[in-house]
Amino acid sequence: VFALVRAIDIPLDPALGMIMDRTRTRWGRYRIWTVVGAPILMIALIMLFQAPEGSGQLYLGGWLLIMYLGTSILGLSHSAWAATLATNYHERSRIFAVMTAVGVLGSVLVLVIPIVLEQQGLTDAQGVKAMGWFIIGLTPVAVALVVWRTPEKITVDVGSKHFNLADYWALISRPNMIRILLADLCLSLGPGWMAALYLFYFKDARGFSTSEANILLLVYILAGFAGAPSVSWLANRISKHRAVMVTTTGYSLMLMLVGFLPKGSMMLALPAMFMAGFLAAGFGVMTRAITADIGDEVRLDGGKERIGLIYALTVLTGKVAGAFSIFLTFTVLARVGYNAKEGATNTAEAIHNLELAYLIGPIVFVMLGGACFIGYKLDAKNHAEVRRKLEERDALYDEAAIIASVTAEPGNVVVDSKI
């Protein structure tokens, strides 16, 4: 059921992105979609967590699909809205770093809920249900704050030509789009591969207990709270694409270091996993900020806002990578003779092969992700020139609309919910 729903869900993102980019309302372009996405997600979660006894696969699949729809709407509108708020090269690094850091805190809060409830004697099922209700309760509060306090700028669209398949191909075949899509795919595949093998590797190969492995994983995740703003600081000094190359190289070195540490040593594994998570947080920050810069370049050349569609394409690569990494890793394990079933006994050779699979796969993909930016030209200087041309053109269209209404397209509007 999950695989089928995911297969249906993946093509929805580009369609949603295109629709969002063409939306124009008095309340904004992406704000309205944030408002729409919240109740969809909440209703789907309620129906899933309150499923009646005897609910079949059709019920589960239908509400899962609606949940994914709500998640996609909120995620795409959130990223696209942020990209329009921060137009400066360096501002984007900072705003996406803050978003990532806050996201890390949210993830940790959700993960801590079942741990706390378990200490109070509640079951795992009750803990999972509490996680769901926490998300349901927090969603309207978060959306209300964003909609109320955040302004939105609707950019100028030049011309009236509708987006067609030829335009779609022209978009994804742009050199910088190829770079960011391949980089995003690789930088999702690497950590996804690592996540799929994590418990097997740390328990069977590194000699940690399940609780110790979970503590190391929590440290890895929490490190992103410090890593995201730190990588943003680095990017503002050496440029975003170079920051990606630095973080991918450092991440790979940390993974290799873990393999050489004494087995079962928490004191040595903790700082290594902290640094790995610290650097991994930079992947998402930089690729999202770079995607926003490429969106400006696309709008300058094509005259239309495509940032929603562009983010949708990166979300699509992430979903494909997530599904493929699980399939690929377990296929590799089967080929090298490691039995991943619970309670299975593996030979020393099989465990050695597990170590190789855990290290080689993520490192290869992550390093390929960094290599995608070799020769990348859209740095701070070139992006500033793109923004200058966009602002000059936007100003001309605004002035023309005021004087003579020479275009049927609306001018540049700032929508503030407080007005």
Image (tube, helix red, strand yellow):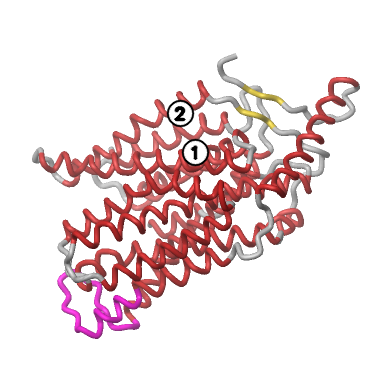
Q: In this view, does 312 lie above or below 399?
A: below
Which amino acid, by three-letter code, is at mark 2? Answer: Val
Magenta highlight on residue 27: no
Which part of the image, by quadrant, shows the N terminus? bottom left
Secondary structure category for the residue under label 2: helix
Residue 229's tag is none
Question: What residue is shown at x 81% (from left), y 38% (from top)?
Answer: 158
Question: What residue is shown at x 57% (from left), y 29% (from top)?
Answer: 32
Can you identify the residue that label 2 sits on?
143
Q: Position of residue 159 (x, y in %)?
A: 83, 39
Q: Nearer the viewer, residue 359 or 382?
A: 382
In screen coordinates, is 25 left or right of 344? right
Magenta highlight on residue 337: yes
Q: Where is residue 107 in the image (x, y as percent from the top left)?
A: 34, 43
Q: Give the range drawn in magenta.
A: 335-357
Question: What residue is shown at x 80% (from left), y 29% (from top)?
Answer: 395
- Please report whichever mark, 1 or 2, sits nearer to the chain's N-terminal start: 1
Q: Are marks 1 and 2 in contact (CB under 8 Å)?
A: yes
Residue at the extreme left: 121
In screen coordinates, is 67 left or right of 115? right
Secondary structure category for the residue under label 1: helix
Q: Position of residue 411 (x, y in %)?
A: 77, 27
Can you identify the residue that label 1 sits on?
74
Q: Nearer the viewer, residue 94 or 134?
A: 94
Q: Where is residue 355 in the image (x, y as percent from the top left)?
A: 30, 76
Question: What residue is shown at x 48% (from left), y 61% (from top)?
Answer: 187
Which part of the image, by quadrant, shows the C terminus? top right
Which amino acid, by three-letter code, is at mark 1? Answer: Leu
In screen coordinates, is 158 left or right of 344? right
